[in-house]
Image (cartoon, rainbow, N blue to C red):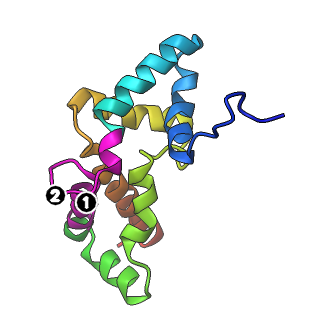
């Protein structure tokens, strides 16, 4: 038997975006239409490589700038040992933290994306996680 019944397995990203929304709506039709609206409004921008604001290149640059400003010593240390911070955070931003944070946390981040009508929340949250983990690991 072929799974799913249509024979086409959706790419991982689409499933990662849809899974947290399954906790919000039990009706599959409502979940589908809300997922489609969020994808068309926000998540499709994560697949666009351009210099337009709020596309993936702009968001990754925003992450690097924010982290560099907040924790320059952390950025220097990670680059010095050969682990650029963006290598870790790119998938967080690309998948909107789905699969990387708990479902309630992902939905809280997405709620901020909807509230501010901006994907800039994603790189800021990623930089905040780095900053928080660095502060906890190396208190001054």
Q: What x and y, as percent, mark residue 10? A: 58, 39
Q: How many marks?
A: 2
At x 53%, y 12%, the residue is: 29
At x 34%, y 55%, the residue is: 128
* Mark 2 surroundings: few (<14), some (14-19) or many (≥20) residues within 10 A: few
Q: What x and y, as percent, mark residue 92? A: 44, 54
At x 27%, y 42%, the residue is: 119
Judge whether residue 4 is colored magenta: no
Please report contact status of discs 2 and 1: CB closer than 8 Å, yes or no.
Answer: yes
The label on residue 91 is none
Q: What x and y, as percent, mark residue 80? A: 37, 89
SS state under label 2: loop
Vertical placement of residue 119 versus 19, above or below = below
Vertical placement of residue 57 versus 105, above or below = below
Which residue carries the number 2 mark? Answer: 51
Highlighted range, magenta: 44-67
SS state under label 1: helix
Vertical placement of residue 46 versus 75, above or below = above
Q: Quadrant of the C terminus?
A: bottom left
Lower position in the chain sequence, tag 2 or tag 1: 2
The label on residue 57 is 1
Q: Quadrant of residue 117?
A: top left
Residue 139 visible at all: no
Q: What x and y, as percent, mark residue 137? A: 47, 69
Is 75 left, or right, of 29 in this rendering? left
Q: Quadrant of the N terminus?
A: top right
Q: Residue furthest left?
A: 52
């Amino acid at each position: 038997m072929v799974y799913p019944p249509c024979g086409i397995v959706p790419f991982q990203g689409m499933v990662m975006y849809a899974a947290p929304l399954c906790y919000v709506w039990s009706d599959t039709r409502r979940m589908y239409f809300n997922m489609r609206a969020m994808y068309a409004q926000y998540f499709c921008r994560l697949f666009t490589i351009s210099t337009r604001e709020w596309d993936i290149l702009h968001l990754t640059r925003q992450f690097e700038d924010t982290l560099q400003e907040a924790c320059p010593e952390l950025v220097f240390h990670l680059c010095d040992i050969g682990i650029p911070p963006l290598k870790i955070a790119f998938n967080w931003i690309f998948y909107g933290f789905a699969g990387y944070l708990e479902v309630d946390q992902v939905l809280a981040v997405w709620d901020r994306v909807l509230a501010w009508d901006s994907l800039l929340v994603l790189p800021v949250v990623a930089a905040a996680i780095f900053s928080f983990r660095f502060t906890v690991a190396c208190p001054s």
